[in-house]
Image: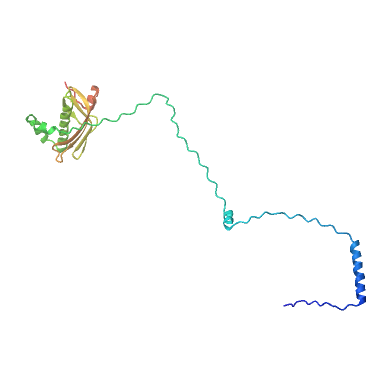
Amino acid sequence: MRGPVVVTLQNEASPWGISTSVVLHALFAAILALMPIPKRTNRPEEERVSVDILTPQQFEASTRPPPAPAAPVAPKARAAEPPPASGPPRPQPHSAPAMIRPTEMLSAKTLADPRSRQARADLATFASDERMVQLCNLEAMDQIRRWRADFQPEQVVPYATAEEKITGTTIAANGAAFRSRRNWYGLKFRCQLAHDGESVVGFGFLVGDPVAREKWDELGLPAVH
């Protein structure tokens, strides 16, 4: 390590040395007086910068990326107005009429009458499905007769326009027809029999329009002479 530099002053002075020093100083002063004063250099003015002092919270906030601009909200689409009607409104389709569902079954009472002895004997000779169909045909004639006195049903064809369907002890005849007063009428019925198939326990029916006479032969509906 370098040590400090020690400067030693000399206090002894001779008369010649003093006079010589005075002369030199006077000469140096004269020279300086004669020299032109140097011009001040125009230093460019320093650009001033404004400085803001921020807290740590302010600095953190300033360095966060700017939030993404919110997506513009699309205007709600207006419901399309129905076009003006170009003609009269179309008629709405009518719902199918409900079936008539009587609460009392009538075929058992009819067969119990002494006058139905032959009918009972004939039913005993039929196969199970055919016997159930004939029981339902009889129930249909009895129920139609009670429903409207002006009808006098005397025969039912359960397969006039469509085959009847037998499911277990349920028979659905959507294309049946019955004859009354020498005319044929459309008929639809649903017949529910007991588990043994020997009696009707539930029935519903719907009478349709008269069947055109020119269709009788086509549908197998016998004319009455």
Pick the quarter of the image with the C terminus.
top left
Name, please, the residue furthest toward the left: 114
Q: Quadrant of residue 121?
A: top left
| Residue 13 rendering spot, x and y as whole percentages | 89, 77
Residue in view at x 19 percent, y 27 percent:
178
Name, please, the residue furthest toward the bottom: 12
Compare residues 29 and 182 and report the one nearer the observer.
29
| Residue 32 rendering spot, x and y as whole percentages | 89, 63
| Residue 95 rendering spot, x and y as whole percentages | 29, 30
Above or below: residue 199 compared with residue 87: below
Q: Quadrant of residue 27?
A: bottom right
Above or below: residue 26 compared with residue 123: below
Left or right position of 39 against 114: right
| Residue 213 rendering spot, x and y as whole percentages | 23, 22
Left or right position of 102 against 28: left
Q: Quadrant of residue 55?
A: bottom right
Compare residues 84 and 112 and report the one nearer the observer.
84
Pick the quarter of the image with the N terminus.
bottom right
Left or right position of 10 against 141: right
Compare residues 53 and 25 and report the one nearer the observer.
25
